[in-house]
């Protein structure tokens, strides 16, 4: 019995007016043509890592085992921050090491630094790692690449910005 194609779910702050999301999908489908691509959201507020983390954390459990999530909300693109991959609960998560995956810290998640030289596109842009690093690595996972081959284990990840406080009105006062 052939294995079922994997889902690749995308979370970005790109919006949908420009071709960036479509280009990432094209790269992924060029490597894993049987993958199912899902647009979880592309409307994370620009550079709002906490909102991207929340969208990913709140949604992941509703996807089937084997889903590969790609989260790109990356104010540090072009810097020395790592490209991360995580495996937790039968799902995979790829994102910059900027706090997007902090909801997995303290769990049984396994983290790896993606070897962009091995699994990314060349030439690699300094500002479009979604296309050049994350989409190809996600597609390779979806096509059957072993998680362990993505790169070396990572012991600690960036905590990222704190989530904003939840505020509620109670008796005419704002609390939280």
Image (tube, rainbow, N blue to C red):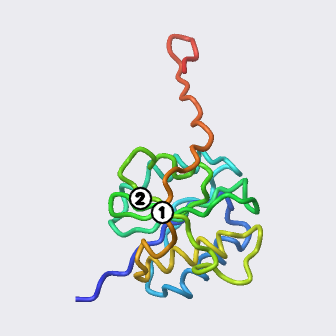
Task: Pick the residue in front: 175 or 161.
Answer: 161
Foreground: 2 or 126? Answer: 126
Determine which of the numbered discs, if any, sits on residue 110 in the image.
Answer: 2
Residue drawn at x 55%, y 64% is 113
Classify residue 67 by image quadrant.
bottom left
The reply, left or right, for residue 39 in relation to residue 143 is right
In contact (CB < 8 Å): disc 2 and disc 1: yes
Q: Categorize mark 1 by other alpha carbons within 10 Å: few (<14), some (14-19), many (20+).
A: some
* Spatial CA span between label 2 and label 1: 8 Å
Query: Which residue is located at x 43 percent, y 80 percent?
Result: 145
Taking 108 as reference, is 31 above or below it?
Answer: below
Left or right of 14? Residue 34 is left
User: Which residue is at 45% across, 47% downward?
Assistant: 105
Task: Please tell me whether mark 2 sits on a helix, a strand or a loop.
Answer: strand
Eyeballing the image, is 162 above or below 137? above
- Quadrant position of residue 160: top right
The image shows residue 51 at horizontal and vertical percentages of 59, 46
Splitting the image into 4 quarters, where does residue 28 fall?
A: bottom right
Of residues 43 and 128, the one drawn nearer to the viewer in this rendering: 128
The residue where tag 1 is placed is 153
């Amino acid at each position: 019995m052939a294995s079922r194609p994997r889902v690749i779910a995308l979370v970005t702050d790109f919006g949908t007016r420009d071709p960036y999301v479509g280009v990432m999908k094209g790269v992924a489908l060029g490597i894993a043509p049987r993958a199912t691509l899902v647009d979880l959201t592309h409307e994370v507020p620009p550079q709002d890592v906490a909102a991207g983390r929340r969208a990913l954390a709140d949604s992941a459990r509703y996807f089937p085992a084997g889903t590969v999530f790609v989260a790109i909300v990356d104010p540090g693109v072009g810097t020395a921050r790592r490209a991360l991959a995580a495996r937790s609960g039968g799902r995979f998560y790829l994102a910059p090491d900027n706090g997007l995956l902090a909801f997995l810290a303290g769990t049984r998640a396994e983290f790896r630094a993606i070897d962009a030289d091995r699994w990314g596109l060349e030439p690699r842009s300094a500002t479009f790692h979604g296309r050049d690093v994350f989409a190809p690595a996600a597609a390779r996972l979806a096509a059957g690449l072993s998680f362990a081959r993505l790169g070396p284990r990572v012991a600690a990840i960036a905590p990222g910005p704190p989530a904003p406080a939840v505020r509620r009105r109670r008796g005419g006062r704002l609390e939280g």
